[in-house]
Image (cartoon, rainbow, N blue to C red):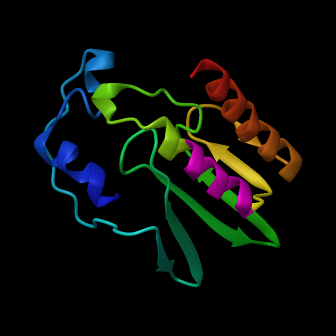
Amino acid sequence: MHHLDAEAVEQGDDKMTAASWYNLRFPPMSVDVKLTGERQRLRFGGQELVCLHTPGHTPGSLSVYLDRGGKRVLFGQDIHGPFCPEFGSDLAAWRRSMDKLLALKADILCEGHFVIYQPQETVTQYIQHYLKMYSESS
């Protein structure tokens, strides 16, 4: 995970991890690998994953993508929000992050809370929908 969110996990912060939303406790746990910077590449066998720092929902939000079989597959969670002070949310940072994701021109989006979106036009429309929605509400 990104180092900017690691402290909440290591301290077992029920609010920052959203455990309190579900009436759960989040026990403290160590984070083995803390990513830093804008972009880091991780290799697993012959496959490369790119971890892209996409702050907004939380300071350390990450999106991950890979190129496989001629397609760019994006794993993006919380593109839709929510944005809460207890998460350290930042809408301006989120907008910049969404611009980064749009620039990837992903063919497939695996959105952690919803479904898989494809092709590229549908991925773009999904992200743009939330950009429009949050620009009108702020």
In the rendered view, tell whether residue 24 sits above or below residue 67.
Answer: above
Residue 110 percent across, percent down from the top left:
65, 46
Provide the major secondary structure of the magenta segment. helix
Write the start and end of the magenta stretch as one range: 95-104
Left or right for 122, reference 28? right
Residue sitting at x 80%, y 57%: 107
Q: Which residue appears at 39% of the width and 35% of the height?
A: 89
| Residue 18 showing in the rendered view | no
Q: Within the magenta stretch, is there residue 84? A: no
| Residue 28 screen position, x and y as percent | 12, 42
Q: Position of residue 9 (x, y in %)?
A: 21, 45
Q: Nearer the viewer, residue 54 or 111?
A: 54
Is 44 placed left or right of 67 in the picture? left
Q: Is residue 14 visible?
A: yes
Compared across the picture, whether 105 is left or right of 138 comes to right
Q: Position of residue 137 (x, y in %)?
A: 60, 19
Which image quarter: residue 106? bottom right
Return the residue nearer the eye: 89 or 69. Answer: 89
Tell me the quarter of the image containing the N terminus. bottom left
